[in-house]
Image (cartoon, rainbow, N blue to C red):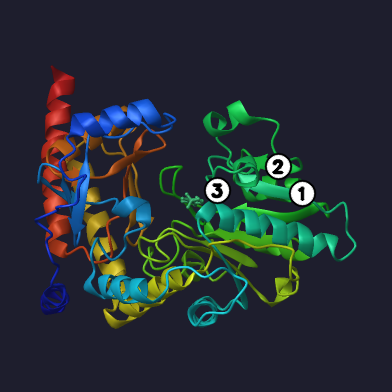
Amino acid sequence: MAWFMEMLRKEHTFMETTEITDSYSRLSREEIQALEEQYLFPTYKRYDLFISHGSGAYVFDIEGRKYLDFLAGIAVNSLGYNHPRLVRVLEEQGQRIIHCSNLFYHRYQGILAKRLAEISGMSRVFFTNSGTEAIEAALKISRAYSHKRGKLNKSGIVALKNSFHGRTFGALSITAQEKYQAPFRPLVPEVTIMEDIAVPALERVFSDRICAMVVEPIQGEAGVVPISPDFLRAARELCTRHDALLVFDEIQCGLGRTGRYFAFQNYGIEPDLITLAKSLAAGYPLGAVLGNKRVADSLQPGEHGTTFGGGPLACRLALEFLDVVEDEALLDRVAQLGEHLIRGLRGLASLHKTIGEVRGLGLMVGADLGAAAKTVVQKLLKRGIIANAAHESVLRLLPPFIVTQDEVNDFLRILDEVLTEVEAEARD
Ligand SMILES: *Cc1c(COP(=O)(O)O)cnc(C)c1O
């Protein structure tokens, strides 16, 4: 295997941008922070990291310090920060046309939809700009599917506790986390949140008034929590029996993250709708909802739309992303490195009592660290590693697909040191 990794490594000749000379390059961290404090709604509590640029699996801060990135822009930058093939497409397409509205045809939307249909087994695609909008489209398709069959009372939507589907009203209504919902009620009606993610509870929740069930096969923001295959199978059966749509939110776990194109392909269960975004255009905003034959006629002209979604630049970047994944055999690489990472973390768990359960699939990995999670993330950052704490207590790792085994080993070595330090401090 070593030669294989070595070969993959040599193919990546990333350019390290050392000189940045735009007129804003002299802003100091204090100035950047002051501007944001004065002019932004304070929605983000940012880490103390001021990013300048990136190269491969590394980002550089404005003072030139280098960080190994195990978060990839939250599962977005799957090919790292300046993959030469993406850079070339950006330059080339930027010269031609960036945006042209959905009133007209362009070359790339149909061909991208075809590619997504081929790798997913789905039949139809609608493009959006974000994950949240893909969820909104899925919810609208779900209601339209039932209502257009004359079932006007079939509007109920089932979602799971600790889910994350986005921040607009529809998506927020099925995002079952109090801190996100509380300030904004009333939300969209007819949503049922399952507190107990178990088959008997699912059977109780279902009725002919349910039009859709939305599930992240592996919950991301909840702290990398895989939903059991038994539960997913039962959801599939109940949706079929009650003529409801099974929606898999693969915005985080899809598009190669688990070592297959889609997370559902690990379980042998087919959803009716799939939402995508994050890594779809590998760093440029693009989302999509994919639907099977059953839902193909749910939307007619004028019933849904977007100004930006599926523009030529976004679509070309997504086509290039999918080509690179295939040309560089990245799915196998994600599967192998994911196993290596999980094995390494389980090894560390036997040395450090701070690590509880280690979960995940491919390069979507979580390690339970309890109350230490945030401290560990801060200490990793000080030592040049970017990760984050999901659901307060879980170290969440989403490295880019182009990460190398050596880089995974670097990460494990530094995590080992950080945990030793954290445990020593706890004893003092
Ligand atoms: C990130 C995410 C979303 C929201 O996507 P945005 O692009 O931020 O709107 C929805 N669902 C899941 C599972 C996500 O991880």
Question: What residue is shown with label 2?
Answer: 192
Q: Does the beta carbon of the residue at mark 3 sit less than 8 Å from ligand 1?
A: yes
Where residue 156 is drawn, which disc sits there?
Answer: 1
Q: Is residue 253 above or below residue 324?
A: above
- Would residue 243 be seen by someone viewing this image from the given angle? no
Q: Residue 336 lies in what quarter of the image? A: bottom left
Looking at numbered disc 2 in the image, what kind of residue is underneath it? Thr
Residue found farthest to the top? 428
Alpha carbon distance from label 2 to label 1? 7 Å
* SS under mark 2: strand
Q: Which numbered disc, 1 or 3, marks the residue closer to the eye?
A: 3
Q: Residue at x 36, y 26 (%)?
A: 38
| Residue 307, x across and y down, in percent | 58, 61
Q: Is residue 289 left or right of residue 314?
A: right
Q: Which mark is residue 165?
A: 3
Image point (13%, 72%), residue name: 13
Q: CA distance from mark 1 to mark 3?
A: 17 Å
Q: Residues within 10 Å of mark 1 (few under 14, many from 20)?
A: many
